[in-house]
Image: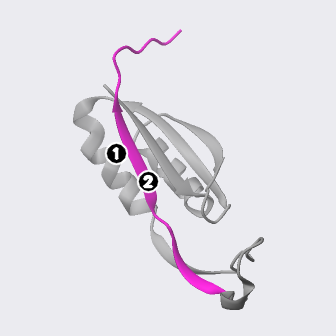
């Protein structure tokens, strides 16, 4: 058995949640915040059997697409403001960061 932790952008979370339910995967959704852009994310905790991991990864991949987004840069605090450019920059956001962890024991009460 494995525990899959998938961190996805909030824009993708409802689509992924619906796809997981349709494929009969049970998941716990947690609100989380990314450290780089300080933007909202959703972390899914999904317990599943080893043989279902490949199908689960395909569902996550199909429903969590990366995209370009304009982001206002954070001004430097106490740093050199000479090189600071206050214009929005384009960064890649979205997709999914997925961790697959072994589970020693699983109990449901």
Residue found 51% across the figure and 50% down from its top: 7
**Which of 72 and 21 lies nearest the eye of the viewer?**
72
Left or right: residue 37 versus residue 96 is right
Residue 105 versus residue 68 in the image, above or below? above
Q: Which residues are magenta?
A: 88-109
Residue found 28% across the figure and 40% down from its top: 53
Q: Secondary structure at mark 2?
A: strand
Q: Is residue 104 magenta?
A: yes
Left or right: residue 4 versus residue 50 is right
Residue found 60% across the figure and 63% down from its top: 36
Q: Residue at the far left: name it.
A: 51
Q: Percent position (x, y) of residue 62? A: 38, 62
Q: Percent position (x, y) of residue 37? A: 63, 66
Q: Percent position (x, y) of residue 72? A: 70, 80
Q: Earlier in the sequence, mark 2 or mark 1?
A: 1
Q: Which residue is mark 1?
A: 56
Residue 97: give its label. Answer: 2
Q: Residues within 10 Å of mark 1 (few under 14, many from 20)?
A: some
Q: Residue at the far top: name it.
A: 109
Q: Are marks 2 and 1 in contact (CB under 8 Å)?
A: no
């Amino acid at each position: 058995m494995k525990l899959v932790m998938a961190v996805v952008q909030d824009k993708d979370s409802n689509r992924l949640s619906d796809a997981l339910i349709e494929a009969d995967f049970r998941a716990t959704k947690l609100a989380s915040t990314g450290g780089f852009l300080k933007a909202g994310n959703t972390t899914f905790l999904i317990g599943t059997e080893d043989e279902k991991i490949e199908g689960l990864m395909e569902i996550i991949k199909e429903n969590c697409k990366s995209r370009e987004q304009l982001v206002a840069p954070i001004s430097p605090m106490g740093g050199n403001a000479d090189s600071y450019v206050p214009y929005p920059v384009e960064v890649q956001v979205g997709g999914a960061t997925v961790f697959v962890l072994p589970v020693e024991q699983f109990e449901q009460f």
